[in-house]
């Protein structure tokens, strides 16, 4: 069983920066993707950024050029460096792990990011 624990959320002024981290407990083998999602409405979550086991990255258009995702496979950790934050980035950010070709999905509990104008 894998558990994901996020950290690094908080309150920041527009234009500021935050760095989110997520540590996956347990062993992760083979095909996998670590990613960050955020709540958009109701129970909907949108992809913010993700990175595969072999370091391919994907970003939402709204964060390209401002956010950078990275992972440390030795530590089963993913980071999200968020720069030039905007009020519309305010949300709960969730760490997600997809494992396998027909992926099994794990979610973290979420961390709140609030950007004031």
Image: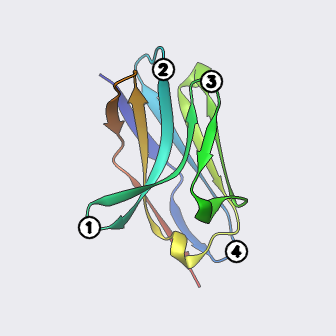
Q: Secondary structure at mark 4?
A: loop
x%, y% of residue 32?
Answer: 47, 25
Give the residue at x 35% y 27%. 103
Given residues 46 and 73, the one toward you in this image is 46
Q: Which scheme is used to colour this image of the protein? A: rainbow
Can you say whether 36 is above or below 64 in the image?
above
x%, y% of residue 69?
Answer: 63, 44
Q: What residue is shown with label 3?
A: 54
Q: CA distance from mark 3 to mark 1?
A: 33 Å
**How many C-alpha atoms fall within 10 Å of the one at disc 2: few (<14), some, or many (≥20)?**
some
**Residue 31 disc label:** 2
Q: What residue is shown with label 1?
A: 42
x%, y% of residue 98?
Answer: 40, 31
Q: Secondary structure at mark 3?
A: loop
In the image, is 36 to the left or to the right of 41?
right
Q: CA distance from mark 2 to mark 1?
A: 30 Å
Give the residue at x 35% y 31%. 3
Q: Secondary structure at mark 1?
A: loop
**Residue 8 disc label:** none
């Amino acid at each position: 069983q894998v558990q994901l624990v996020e950290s690094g959320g908080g309150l920041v002024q527009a234009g500021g920066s935050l760095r989110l981290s997520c540590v996956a407990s347990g062993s992760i083998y083979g095909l996998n993707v670590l990613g960050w999602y955020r709540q958009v409405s109701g129970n909907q979550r949108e992809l913010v950024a993700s990175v595969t086991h072999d370091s391919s990255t994907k970003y939402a258009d709204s964060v390209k050029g401002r956010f950078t995702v990275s992972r440390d496979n030795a530590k089963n950790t993913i980071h999200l460096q968020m720069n030039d934050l905007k009020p519309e980035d305010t949300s709960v950010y969730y760490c997600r792990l997809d494992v396998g070709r027909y992926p099994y999905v794990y979610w973290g509990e979420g961390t709140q990011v609030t950007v004031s104008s």
